[in-house]
Image (spheres, helix red, strand yellow):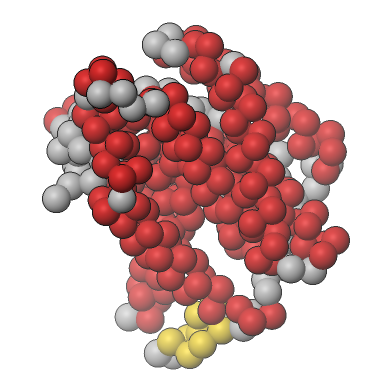
Amino acid sequence: MSYYLILILNSLAYGALMFLISSGFSLIFGLMKITNMTHAVFYMMGSYIGITIVRAMGSFTLAAVIAGVIVAVIGLIVFRFFLFQLQGKQQSQVLLCIGFMFFFDDLLLVIFGGTPMTIPIPKLLSGSIPLLDRSYSIYRLFLILVGVVVMILLYLIIEKTKLGCLVRSGVDDEETTRAMGVNINRLFFIIYGGGTFLAAVGGVLGGPWLGMEPRMCFALMPMMLAVVIIGGLGNLKGAFFGSIIVGLLYTFGTAIFPDYSYFVLFLPMALVLAFKPNGLFNSGKVVDD
């Protein structure tokens, strides 16, 4: 019983990290129709910047905030001077984003080297608590809490604020939103910057558990795509529950069927694509009522 309980908790912790990446990816695609393949490398970039700040300043919280801001600025530069010029040209966007993935990945390899690294767990969150006849990491419970809190905050922003109303209307009907005088380009910048910020913060939070190493972004990308395909693009609820489903499939698949873990994960994704291509939770809105 305790073994499976730990697997479930690990699934939720992994799903929380996937949600931090995939929520921004999903909203960016839903509003801006940009298949932002660089999103995974922004997570990786956040991890490396985070460990640098932790080593220099000794603060995990500052590392998450500063890394998020720096990566968001880099992401906005990429968007403004490159992706923004290719609006409506999805194939060109995908190719450009893949190019930036290779560029940033090699740049991080040059700067930080190829040795795998992990960010130290903050003292307040180190250690474990008893769980039946085993013990469980306090830090992973903290990740689950962060995922829930971020979900609630994003829900309130999307559902209860003027900004959220504009995002929902932009996803549903961009042309009408523009015709009503809304500066949709400014909205693009806010969503892209916010999504990139969350991905980088996720990189810092994932650093103590998943660590960082070269080419890590290429392993994360299929997981992120699985989340948004299963949950539904442009759908916050879909990103949340899609992340949980992917976390469960990947964790249990790796533990029970280690030789077929990717099969266990991507077979359900293929079935969703075949029978419900809009995703399990996609109702045409960013957040369902």
Q: Position of residue 155 (x, y in %)?
A: 31, 54
Image side of residue 236 versus residue 15, left or right: left
Residue 35 seen in the current view: no
Q: Position of residue 189 (x, y in %)?
A: 50, 31
Q: Position of residue 18 (x, y in %)?
A: 45, 50
Image side of residue 152 versus residue 57, left or right: left
On the rendered image, what quadrant is the N terminus found in?
bottom left
Image side of residue 287 versus residue 202, left or right: left
- Which residue appears at 71% of the width and 24% of the height? 103
Residue 89 drawn above or below residue 3: above
- Which residue appears at 65% of the width and 37% of the height? 73
- Which residue appears at 59% of the width and 31% of the height? 76
Would you identify the image quadrant in which residue 219 lies? Answer: top right
Residue 243 drawn above or below residue 95: below
Which residue is more in the foreground, 162 or 170? 162
Which residue is more in the foreground, 263 or 41? 41
Would you identify the image quadrant in which residue 281 lies? Answer: top left
Which residue is more in the foreground, 83 or 50? 83
Which residue is more in the foreground, 268 or 80? 80
Would you identify the image quadrant in which residue 209 lies? Answer: bottom right
- Which residue appears at 60% of the width and 33% of the height? 75
Residue 49 seen in the current view: yes
Disc count in the image? 0
Q: Position of residue 112 (x, y in %)?
A: 83, 43
Residue 24 drawn above or below residue 32: below
